[in-house]
Image (spheres, helix red, strand yellow):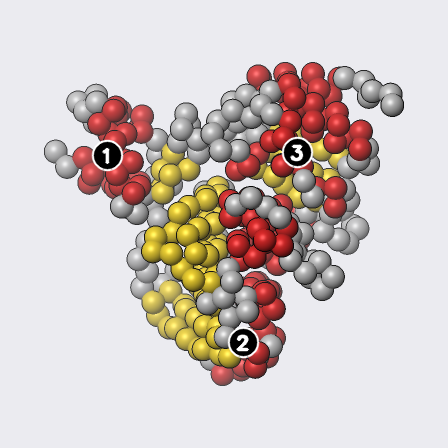
Amino acid sequence: MDIRKDILQMANEQKTFKTTDIVKKLGGKISRQYISALISQMVKEGLLLKGGSTASAFYVLPINEVLIVETIKLRFERNQIKEHEVFNKLRDRYNLVRGLSENLQSILFYAFTEMLNNAIEHSESENIEIEIRKEKSNLTFIVNDFGIGVFRNVMKQRGLKSEIEAMQDLLKGKTTTRPHSHTGEGIFFTSKIADIFLLESFEYRLRVDNLIKDVFFEELKPSKKGTRVIFTISNNSKKHLDDVFNKFVANPGEPGFNKTEILIRLFIQGTIYISRSQARRIMSGLDKYESVVLDYDRVSTVGQAFADEIYRVFKNNYPNIKIESRNMIEPVKFMVERAESNKPKLN
C-alpha cells in the first residue's frame, strides 16, 4: 500500500483535505498517528502545504509545475529605471503583454508597477531582475532584488520584534517605511487581486492563496537575499481592479482605502488568544481606518482581557471606527458580547 500516493491523489482531487479524510479513505487500516507523521514529513519535503491551526489543520498541494508558453526576462540597474517606463517597454515590444484581455492588462499594470516601484525605492539593491511568463493556465510575473529585504526593513523602521510581525503588519495595509511618500497600499491590494501571491525575503515567505482563501507564514529554505515577489493569476480571470478596491471602502460611493480585514489567527503563535498585549498588537495601526473587520476563523477561544482591549478600550478611544466581527464560534462570541456590553469607565 503506497500511502503517500493515496495522500497526493486526494490532494490532487480535492482543493483541501484533512488527516481524517485520509484515515477514512484507508478504512481505518492505518493509524491516525502514523498518517499524521507521514503528512508532516511530506510538508517538510515541500510536497504539501499546511493551513490552519493544529486542531483544524488542512493540507493543499503547492503550486504545480507548469508548462511555460512564453517568457520575458530582463535585468536593470535600479537607479536607471522607472516602473511605468519598464511596463510600457514590455507592452510595446512583446505580444505576451499586448495580447492580454483588458481586465488582465489593468491588473498586470497595477500589480507589476507597484511591486517594481517598491524594489526601486526601498530595496537599495544595485540590480533588479524581472520576469513575466505566460503559462498554459496562468500569467506570472516575478520582481527580484538583492537588497535589504522587505520584512527586515519593515521590522527595523517600525520597531517590530520579528519578521513575522512585519508580515502581520503588511497584511493590515497602509504599512510603509516612507509614510510621507507612500500610502502602503501596494502589497495589500496586489496580494488581494492575485490568485496566488508570494513575498519572499531571507528566511521567510508570505503566501496569500486566494484560490483557497488562506494565508501562510512559511520558512524559506534556502534563504533568499533581498526580496522576491511572485504574482500569479489565471489567464481566464474575470477579476477587475475596481471590485477589489471597492471591497475596502467603508462607505459605498466614497473614494478611499478606509476599510481593512484582519485574520486574527495570523497574529498569535499558538491557539489561545488571552492577553491584553496580544489584542494591542492586533489593533496597532488600525486607527487609520473607518471600518475594521475582525475574522475569527479557526479561533477556538479568547480571553476576557483580550476581548476587553478590543471591544471596550479600543472602541472607547476610537468611537467612530466600526468594528465588525465574523466567523465567531460560541465561546468567542460570548466573550466578545460580554466585552461589548461593559459600559465605558469614567475618568
Crowd class of label 3 (few under 14; some 14 to 19; many from 20; radius 10 Å): some
Residue drawn at the location 35% of the way across and 48% of the way down: 62
Identify the mark at residue 135; answer none if there is no mark: none
Residue type marked 3: Arg
Q: Is residue 50 above or below residue 325?
A: below
**What's the distance in space between the residues labelled 2 and 3, CA to CA?**
38 Å
Q: Residue furthest right?
A: 347
Residue drawn at the location 77% of the way across and 54% of the way down: 255
Q: Is residue 314 above or below residue 284?
A: above
Q: Which residue is mark 3?
A: 280
Q: Residue furthest left?
A: 1
Work out whether residue 64 can be spotted.
Answer: yes
Residue type marked 1: Leu
Residue drawn at the location 57% of the way across and 17% of the way down: 331
- Disc nearer the start of the sequence (2/3): 2
Residue type marked 2: Arg
Rendered-image quadrant of the N terminus:
top left
Q: Nearer the viewer, residue 268 or 2?
A: 268
Name the mark nearer the viewer: 3 or 1. Answer: 3
Q: Position of residue 284 (x, y in %)?
A: 67, 40
Q: Which residue is mark 1?
A: 38
Q: Nearer the viewer, residue 322 or 22?
A: 322
**What's the distance in space between the residues labelled 2 and 1, CA to CA?**
45 Å
Identify the mark at residue 78; answer none if there is no mark: 2
When asked about the image quadrant of residue 52, the answer is: top left
Crowd class of label 1 (few under 14; some 14 to 19; many from 20; radius 10 Å): some
Q: Position of residue 96 (x, y in %)?
A: 45, 74
Q: Position of residue 343 (x, y in %)?
A: 81, 18
Task: Tell me the element at label 1.
Answer: helix
Task: Tell me the element at label 3.
Answer: helix
